[in-house]
Image (cartoon, rainbow, N blue to C red):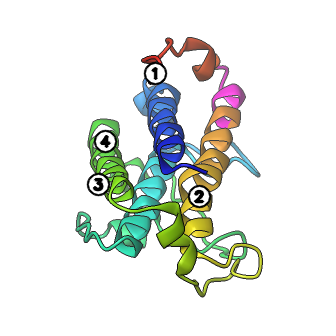
Amino acid sequence: MALESVIRQYAWNLAYADSLTRDVPASKWAESGGPGLENHPAWTLGHLVTGSAMVAQGLGVEVPLPSGWVDLFQRRGPNDSRRPSTETSLYPSRDELMSELTRVHELVSEALRKTSSADLSKVKTEWRFGGYLPTEHDQVLFMLIAHENVHLGQLGCWRRRFGLPSAMGAMEQGPAAP
């Protein structure tokens, strides 16, 4: 798969994250949607920032994050029993989180433009899904597309739980593909 296609999908994810959170009332910013919908917008955006920062580091780009963000936002998958806090004061604002997510997305996209699928496919990785996705290429695709989309889908469900309209339905047509 061409990395430009990955970069376009990753950019779409960023636009979707923006649409999913743009109209969330401040009073709901860190509210759990109940069992299975604990990942509220404040935590989800921060989690996507830390995930993208990990990818950037794997691509050789250092991404300093604000103090405390790794502890607040980085969980280690479905077997991690920690759940996001519903204490709104613990979380940065939507604008700060979207700004940081945009910054990290730009750094990752820039790094991807400087590498190739073939180069990433040569690097073997050691991580819990390595039996399924053994190369850096596999891990990058997972983190930028599958991982982000899992969490964005959770936000879509979270929105419906609170009666908010479809964020995807509200998205405007983006720029035409080259």
Q: What residue type is labelled 2?
A: Leu
Report the residue marked by disc 2.
141
Q: Label 3 vs label 4: CA separation?
A: 21 Å
Specify which label sits upstream in the sequence, 3 or 2: 3
For label 3, the residue is 107
Q: Can residue 75 be seen in this view?
A: no
Q: What stretch is highlighted in magenta?
A: 158-163
Amino acid at pointer 4: Ser
Categorize mark 2 by other alpha carbons within 10 Å: few (<14), some (14-19), many (20+).
some
User: In the image, residue 98 lies at what x, y percent?
Assistant: 34, 40
First reached walking from the N terminus: tag 4 or tag 2? 4
- Mark nearer the N terminus (3 vs 1): 1
Magenta segment includes 104: no
**Vertical relation: 125 (above or below) 112:** below
Q: Quadrant of the C terminus?
A: top left
User: How much space separates mark 3 and mark 2, taking CA atoms?
Assistant: 16 Å
Residue carrying label 1: 23
Helix, strand or loop under label 4: loop
Q: In this view, does 23 lie to the left or right of 100?
A: right
Front disc: 3 or 1: 3
Q: Which residue is drawn at 32% across and 59% down?
A: 114
Q: Which of the two residues, 154 or 171, is positioned nearer the viewer here?
A: 171
Label 1: state its secondary structure: loop
Look at mark 4 in the image and give the residue it sits on. 93
Query: Label 1 sits on what residue type?
Result: Asp
Q: Which of marks 2 and 1 is in front?
A: 2
Disc tally is 4
Quadrant of res 65 = bottom left
